[in-house]
């Protein structure tokens, strides 16, 4: 069985990647005392800091202001009634993706892109924090970045960010991404089992913790996980078709995922 490369911010076949990136982001940008500062759904490699991370009562490092989140238009970054953790996170990710703010690391794994004109010193970051907190009326660095992102959003959505439509889309698509990612993660665990049994077990433990009801085999054994996967492998295809239909995944990538997911385990 082949193992997929991580190439999309909308699906993931190893929830440990999401957890690891969330911890790294918290250490580099906004150390906090509770996990609510960073949302990292197990279906995306792109963790997103919440308003909790940027509040005046939180510790904010320079890295927090190298990211686009404090400068986003409020209608994009706000969380609306009815949004789950995953649907809010993925909606924000998709908005920033559309605005050209998603890049890739050396291995092709999506990551947040660099902001031109971002603060380059702790003093500049503190000035941006003061502007964000409302203790000053203006700051040239913060205001220029906010204006730049507002322009980028206006180019994508000339009529304004379609809040109701985007909230609705991701309320419905996030569960599909979770179910599809759970299936692909089970595929990775099954593929790894013959060559790295300890790693496979570690992944399965992470899946139980991260996916909750989206991953519930009757038995946590190779046979039990295999039986669960056989019932849910179609969820990966449903997810890829949904992403293709919205222009969030290429047909070529979707076909590859389906091909790998349906390979024989023999």
Image (spheres, helix red, strand yellow):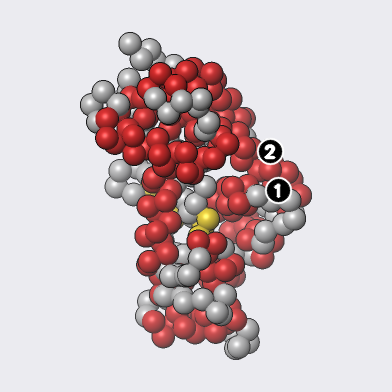
Tell me residue 207's x, y (percent). Answer: 45, 38
Q: Quadrant of residue 73?
A: bottom right
Residue toward you, 212 or 108: 212
The spot of residue 16 in percent (x, y) is 39, 45
Q: Choose between 255 and 44: the one closer to the eye.
A: 44
Residue 232 against residue 99 in the figure, above or below = above
Which numbered circle lies on residue 158? none
Above/below status of 55 relative to 5? below
The label shown at residue 167 is 1
The furthest residue to the bottom: 136
Q: Quadrant of the N terminus?
A: top left
Percent of width and height locating residue 213: 58, 36
In the picture as drawn, the residue positioned furthest to the front comes out as: 219
Q: Residue 226 location in percent, x, y?
A: 43, 20
What is the distance, in whole Å, between disc 2 and disc 1 at their CAs?
A: 9 Å
Residue at left 68%, top 43%?
171
Q: Earlier in the sequence, mark 2 or mark 1?
A: 1
Residue 160 figure quarter: bottom right
* Residue in the image at 52% along x and 33% along y: 215
Label 2: element kind: helix
Residue at disc 1, secondary structure: helix
| Quarter of the C terminus within the rendering | top left
The residue at the point 39 percent across, 25 percent down is 221
Q: In the rendered picture of this protein, how many numbered marks are placed on residues? A: 2
Using the rendered view, name the quadrant where residue 13 is placed. Answer: top left
Q: Is residue 49 above or below residue 251?
A: below
Residue 172 tag number: 2
Of 139 and 155, nearer the camera is 139
Left/right placement of residue 172 relative to residue 195 reads right
């Amino acid at each position: 069985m082949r193992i997929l490369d991580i190439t999309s911010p909308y699906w993931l076949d190893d929830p440990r990647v999401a957890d690891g990136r969330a911890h790294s982001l918290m250490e580099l940008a906004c150390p906090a005392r509770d996990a609510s500062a960073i949302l990292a759904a197990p279906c995306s490699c792109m963790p997103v800091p919440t308003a909790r991370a940027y509040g005046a009562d939180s510790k904010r490092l320079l890295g927090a202001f190298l990211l686009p989140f404090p400068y986003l238009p409020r209608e994009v970054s706000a969380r609306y009634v009815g949004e789950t953790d995953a649907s809010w996170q993925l909606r924000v990710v998709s908005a920033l993706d559309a605005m050209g703010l998603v890049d890739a690391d050396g291995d092709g794994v999506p990551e947040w892109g660099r902001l031109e004109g971002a603060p380059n010193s702790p003093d500049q970051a503190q000035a941006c924090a003061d502007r964000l907190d409302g203790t000053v009326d203006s700051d040239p660095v913060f205001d220029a970045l906010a204006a730049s992102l507002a322009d980028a959003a206006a180019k994508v959505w000339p009529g304004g960010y379609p809040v109701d439509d985007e909230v609705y889309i991701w309320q419905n698509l996030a569960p599909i991404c979770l179910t599809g990612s759970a299936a692909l993660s089970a595929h990775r665990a099954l593929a790894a089992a013959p060559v790295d049994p300890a790693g496979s077990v570690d992944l399965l433990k992470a899946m139980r913790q991260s996916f909750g009801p989206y991953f519930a085999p009757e038995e946590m054994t190779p046979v039990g996980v295999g039986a669960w996967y056989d019932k849910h492998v179609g969820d990966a295809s449903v997810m890829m078709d949904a992403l293709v239909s919205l222009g969030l995944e290429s047909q070529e990538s979707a076909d590859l995922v389906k091909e790998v997911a349906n390979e024989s385990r023999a």
